[in-house]
Image (spheres, rainbow, N blue to C red):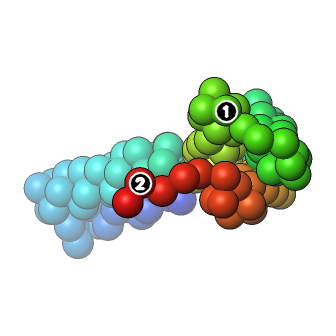
């Protein structure tokens, strides 16, 4: 409970003692302040946390590997295409999750997302379209 809430309850108690507020009014106002405090505490859990680097670093690494693989000019078989798509997907998903839930490692997460997008654009010509 915050100090501000306690001070407000003390002031309400003084008003009740002076006869300005009835016992019922005092209880209602006190309950309102306590409920408001509880609601604010519950909302604080939805804020972003500082977090760790276990999401941004893999996002960057998978994005970088996919981007570097896009420069390979040899013919790719289906397994290699699926592998690069897997790396692109993992980099994008981990980067997006990291940006959504934490503050730490934003630059690495953004770099992983950008590299995964660039890799996906670079390998578009490697996939054959079915007519």
- Residue 58: tell me if it is visible: yes
Foreground pick, 44 / 110: 110
Q: Position of residue 32 (x, y in %)?
A: 25, 57
Identify which residue is drawn at 43% across, 62% down. 8
Q: Which mark is residue 3?
A: none
SS for tag 2?
Answer: loop
Q: CA distance from mark 2 to mark 1?
A: 16 Å
Circle 1 residues within 10 Å: few <14, some 14–19, many ≥20: few
Q: Position of residue 4 (x, y in %)?
A: 53, 59
SS for tag 1?
Answer: loop
Q: Position of residue 108 (x, y in %)?
A: 83, 51
Identify which residue is drawn at 11% across, 55% down. 24
Pointer 2 or 1: first along the chain: 1
- Residue 94: tell me if it is visible: no
In the image: residue 122, left or right of residue 93 = right
Q: Is residue 85 above or below residue 30?
A: above
Foreground pick, 73 / 105: 73
Identify which residue is drawn at 74% across, 60% down. 122
Most distant residue in the top direction: 79
Q: Is residue 65 above or below residue 107?
A: above
Circle 2 residues within 10 Å: few <14, some 14–19, many ≥20: few
| Residue 74 placement: quadrant | top right
Q: Which residue is mark 2?
A: 130
Q: Which residue is mark 1?
A: 77
Q: Position of residue 83 (x, y in %)?
A: 66, 31
Identify which residue is drawn at 41% across, 45% down. 42
């Amino acid at each position: 409970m915050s100090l501000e809430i306690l001070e407000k309850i003390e002031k309400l108690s003084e008003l009740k003692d002076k006869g300005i507020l009835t016992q019922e009014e005092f209880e209602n106002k006190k309950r309102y302040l306590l409920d408001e405090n509880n609601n604010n505490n519950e909302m604080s859990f939805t804020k972003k946390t500082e977090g760790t680097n276990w999401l941004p670093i893999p996002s960057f690494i998978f994005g970088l590997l996919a981007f570097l693989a896009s420069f390979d000019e040899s013919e790719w078989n289906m397994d290699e295409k699926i592998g690069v798509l897997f790396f692109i997907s993992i980099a994008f998903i981990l980067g997006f999750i990291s940006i959504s839930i934490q503050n730490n490692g934003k630059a690495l997460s953004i770099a992983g997302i950008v590299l995964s997008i660039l890799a996906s654009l670079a390998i578009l010509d490697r996939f054959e379209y079915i007519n």
